[in-house]
Structures are given as structure tokens and as C-alpha cells.
Image (cartoon, rainbow, N blue to C red):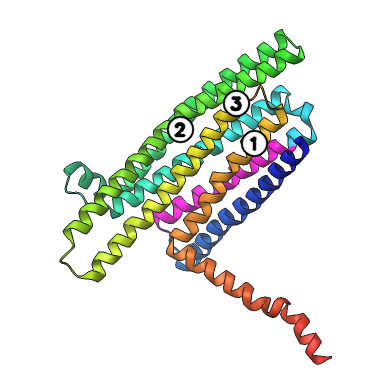
Amino acid sequence: MDGVIKSIFTFILIVEFIIGNLGNSFIVLVNCIDWVKRRKISLVDQLLIALAISRISLVWSIFGSWCVSVVFPALFATEKLLRMLTNIWTVTNHFSVWLATILGTFYFLKIANFSNSIFLYLKWRVKKVVLVLLLVTLVLLFLNILLINIHINASINGYRGNMTCSSASCNFIRFSSAIALTSTVFILIPFTLSLATFLLLTFSLWKHRKKMQHTVKGYRDVSTKAHRGVMQTVITFLLLYAVFCLTFFVSIWISERLKENQIIILSEMMGLAYPSGHSCVLILGNKKLRQASLSVLWWLRYRFKDGEPSGHKEFRESS
């Protein structure tokens, strides 16, 4: 039974790894090609590129740590590798969550309609708001890494003090719990900001639909569509990351009933779900990315029409 569960988790993990790499690489490629063609790049495209790069790094860090834990389990417990993998995950996960929050905030300031003076002040200075949020991100990242390394040092000292098998397992559980608690505290800020953005967008959409009942339909439809598109992007990110956090904590709570390798693969499988799934939502929610993805699909359909490559088809007809 353990082998079946492990095989299922492994298959899901590999599929998520492939989707995450393809989706985020597609976002980077399309925006970079558009950057070269136009010789300029918008702020939203810069955020999308940075977010996609952070997601690619996060996907590789999670997948790499899983490969090390499977192929070289003894190496996974060494001080240097444990410190390196934990710090890499902390940095990539931190930027992944914060850049998604900043992107949602940017969309919110551009699309929402409020007459509040504070909102209008921020709306007119959206680039400065983004820069301030990026600076806040760097400060919180420094504090996050500092606390994470304190937990790593405490875990290593505890392991050296008592090297029995049972104490090592308990030490691993305590270390995982400490890392989860620390990361959650720092991620709670962007998560709360994204939740507030979603609620304000919902209220803005309700006000807009109520105000524009007797206005031209086309204008109302465009603005309503923009509201709904941003809301779908933000709520998908919130749901995926909430599921990841809940699953991560559940895997720690039931760790006494599961083997250590099952805890690792379950956490990493859920860790890959939100950077991989959210990239697909970003592609579908962005007009330029959506059109580019449809063009690629049409090209693949034409290239492999009737189930075979065009070169093979021409050879068969000539013979």
C-alpha cells in the first residue's frame, strides 16, 4: 500500500514539475519576445517576468530537494545541504508569494474605482507603490532568512546532542514545525493583503454594476470583465496557497502515522501545486499570453494534423 501511495505522489509531482516549468517559461518567453519587438516593457510585464522566474526557481528547488531525499537520503540530513535547500526554498517561496501579491495590488489600483482620497493618491502613484512593496519584501526576506537559520542551528545542535533514531525523527518533526510556523508568519502579510485586495475588488465591482445600470452596455461589459479577470487571478492564488499551507501543516500533525519520506513527498507535491497551477491562470487571464498560447496550440494542431508530422505525410504521398 505504501508503494502505491508513493507511486501516485511521485507521478503527480512530476506532472506538476513539467506544467510549472512549461507555464512559467512560456510567460517569460512571450514577454521577452514582446520586449524585444517593442523595445520597451510595461510594469505589469516586468512583474510577470519576475514572478515567472521566481516560480521556476521555486519549482526546481522543491523538485531538487525531493530528488536528493530519494536518491541520497543520508546527504539530505547533512548540515550544509539542509541549510542550502531550506534557504533556497525560503527565498524562492518568499518572492513567489510577494510578487503575486504585488501583481494583484497593481491590477487592483489600475482597475478598481473608489473616490477615497487615499486610494486616489495610491492610484496616481502606482509605480511608487510597487517599489515600496518591493523594498518591504526585501526587508522581510532578510528577517525571514535570519530566523530560519536560527531554527536550523538549533535543530543541528539538538541532533548532535542526541543521535538516536527516535530523537532524530522527533527533531525532524520539530524542525519542520518551526520552519512552517516561521514561514507562515512572514507569508501572512502578503496573504492578508491579497485577501483585502479581493474583497475590495468585489466591492468595487458591485458599486460599478450598480452605478452603470443606465450607461452604455459596452463600457460596462469591458470594466466588468476586467474586474472579474483580476478577481479570478487573485482568488486562485489565495485558494492554491491556502491549500498548500493547510496540507503542509496537516502533514506535520499526522507525521507520527506517516513515514518521513511520505511527509517529504506530500509536502513537496502540494508545494508544486500553487506555482504550477497559478501560472496557467495567469496565462488564461492575460490577453497577450492567452492569444500567444492559442497560437501555439493552433500551430501544434496544424503541425501534427491527422495525427502525423507533415514531413512524414509528404513522404507517404510521394511514395
Please tell me whether residue 46 belongs to the stretch shown in magenta.
yes
Say which of marks 1 and 2 sits in front.
1
- Marks 2/3 in contact by CB < 8 Å: the verdict is no
Q: Position of residue 91 (x, y in %)?
A: 55, 35
Side (left or right) of 113 relative to 237: left
Boundaries of the magenta span: 41-67
Spatial separation of the CA atoms under disc 1 and disc 2: 20 Å
In what element is the residue under mark 1?
Answer: helix
In what element is the residue under mark 2?
Answer: helix
Looking at the rendered structure, which numbered label has been put on residue 266? Answer: 1
Residue bearing mark 3: 252
Residue bearing mark 2: 187
Looking at the rendered structure, which numbered label has been put on residue 162? Answer: none
Q: Earlier in the sequence, mark 1 or mark 2?
A: 2
Q: Earlier in the sequence, mark 3 or mark 1?
A: 3
Q: Is residue 149 above or below residue 99?
A: above
User: Which quadrant holds residue 165?
Assistant: top right
Give me the residue at 24% from left, 65% from top: 220
Q: Position of residue 68 (x, y in %)?
A: 74, 35
